[in-house]
Image: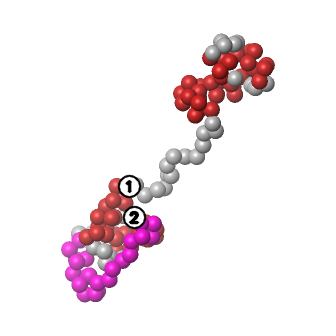
Amino acid sequence: MIQHRIKDSVSVEEILEKYDVSRPIFYKFFKRYNEYGKLGLHNISKAPLNHGRKTSPEKENNLLVLYQKYPFFSSYELQELVSIPAKTIQKIFKRKKMHKSYLPKSQKKTILLEFPI
């Protein structure tokens, strides 16, 4: 259909009759072909490219930097420092296959006192 229009310079009305398609459908694929070439003629997903509630990469990187420095902090303690919900932190840790290490409470308290919250 598109090749007839481009190579043979057949009128749009003749193409619509021959292939039994509507004018908007023809122009939709004609525009796609002009933009993307042959790949534009395949179905294009209408799914969004990004999720509206996804944690920003900047916040996630801040979380990972804190985790490397303090791997013994729980997700609830990190929540106060990074402003990401604890459940989200747990999901990020699970996705990245990270595990918490443990430190005695008395040592952890002295480290937590250093942070201005």
Position of the C terminus, as image quadrant, is bottom left
Point out the stretch of residues depicted in magenta. 94-115
The question of residue 109 being in magenta is answered with yes
Kind of residue at badge 1: Pro
Indicate which label's residue lies in the foreground, 1 or 2. Answer: 1
| Mark 2, secondary structure of its residue | loop
How many numbered discs sit on the rendered protein? 2
Q: Quadrant of residue 32?
A: top right
- Residue positioned 34% across, 55% down in the render: 58
Q: Quadrant of residue 15?
A: top right
Position above or below: 51 against 26: below
Where does the image place residue 1, in percent across and percent down from the top left?
69, 23
Q: Position of residue 14 (x, y in %)?
A: 75, 15
> In the rendered view, would you say 42 is above or below 1?
below
Which one is nearer the viewer's eye here, 60 or 76?
60
Residue 97, position as x, y percentages in the image = 42, 70
According to the picture, the residue beneath numbered tag 2 turns out to be: 84
The numbered disc on residue 90 is: none
* Residue 35 percent location from the top left of the image: 54, 27
The answer to whether marks 1 and 2 mark residues whose Cβ atoms lie closer than 8 Å is no
Which residue type does callout 2 highlight?
Ile
